[in-house]
Image: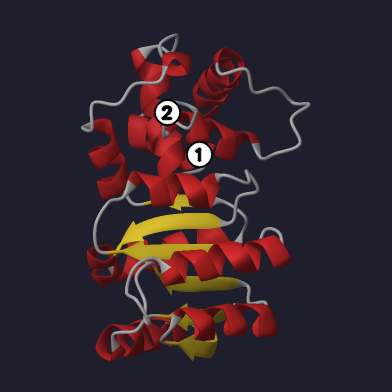
Amino acid sequence: MRIVVAEDLYLLRDGMVRLIEACGHEVVATAATGPETLDALLRWRPDAAVVDVRMPPTQTDEGLRAALAARREVPGLPVLILSQYVEQLYARELLADGTGGVGYFLKESVFDADQFIDALERVAGGGTAMDPAVIAKLLSSGSTNRRLDALTEREHSVLALMAEGLSNQAIARRLFLSDSAIGKYTTSLFGKLGITDDDNGNRRVLAVLAYLNNP
């Protein structure tokens, strides 16, 4: 994969570059500011990008804004966002176009090399990758979504793992169920959430949006 790494902290940026390259992928560009990030994403149009939310010049949300701007120019451009803290709004904005190829991870998860590279590869493949810590935080926030009320406990568990970006096969292994059983649960929860085969967006991404309490 050809990857862009956008992170203003040199040691973390250099560490990610070394990790990514050690796993056989190519880092084609790095960036340390929001404007540099947007320029690199549009110039290289990488197979995936790792982008920090808070970057210079103001250290607010320049990285996220650059990623969203790039995805408007290049629909579906795969981006894995990194954040110091769980901020639900960022996760929702990232998923809002419903096209997949997005992820939201806490920076501390970068130190789990296998998890980080797996997430990056899932995002590059057009899927979603939500940090389990992000999912846990959203679950404990107390927010509710009436569209989820009809789901059974098992369907809710399947959707939570789907939000992490796991495939049906991976969900089956995690829950000790058969692939066919997970297929039935996903079909059922899609139906209860009003997500049909006719939807233009990625059904799994739309389901994750519902899970994140998007209006």
Few, some or many residues within 10 Å of mark 1 (<14, 14–19, 20+): some
Q: Residue at x 38, y 33 (%)?
A: 160
**Lateral position of residue 44 relative to residue 134, left or right:** right
In which quarter of the view is residue 156 placed?
A: top left
Q: Nearest the camera: 110 or 175?
A: 110
Height in image: 48 above or below 118? below
* Residue 29 relative to residue 60: left or right: right
Question: What distance separates the C-alpha of mark 1 from that of mark 2?
Answer: 11 Å
Side of 47 relative to 172 (left or right): right
Q: Quick check: marks 1 and 2 in contact, CB under 8 Å?
A: no
Please indicate, yes or no, whether residue 78 appears anywhere in the rendered image.
no
- Residue 194 x/y as whole percent: 62, 17
Disc on res. 158: 2
Q: SS of the residue at dot 1?
A: helix
The earlier-in-sequence mark between 1 and 2 is: 2
Q: Which residue lies furthest to the top in this view?
A: 150
Residue 1 image offset from top left, x and y in percent? 59, 77
Q: Where residue 64 sits in the image (x, y, percent)?
A: 46, 64
Up-down: is 71 above or below 161?
below
Residue drawn 27% across the image and 32% down it: 139
* Front disc: 1 or 2: 2
| Residue for badge 1 | 169
Q: Quadrant of residue 8?
A: bottom left
- Numbered disc 2: secondary structure: helix
Q: What kind of residue is marked 2?
A: Val
Q: Which residue lies at the image location 34% right of the left edge and 76% below the top edge?
A: 58
For the rendered model, the colour scheme is secondary structure
Depth check: 198 or 168 in front? 198
Q: Residue 159 in the image: x percent, y percent?
A: 44, 29
Amino acid beneath label 1 = Gln
Rendered image: mark on residue 41: none
Q: Is residue 183 above or below residue 62?
A: above
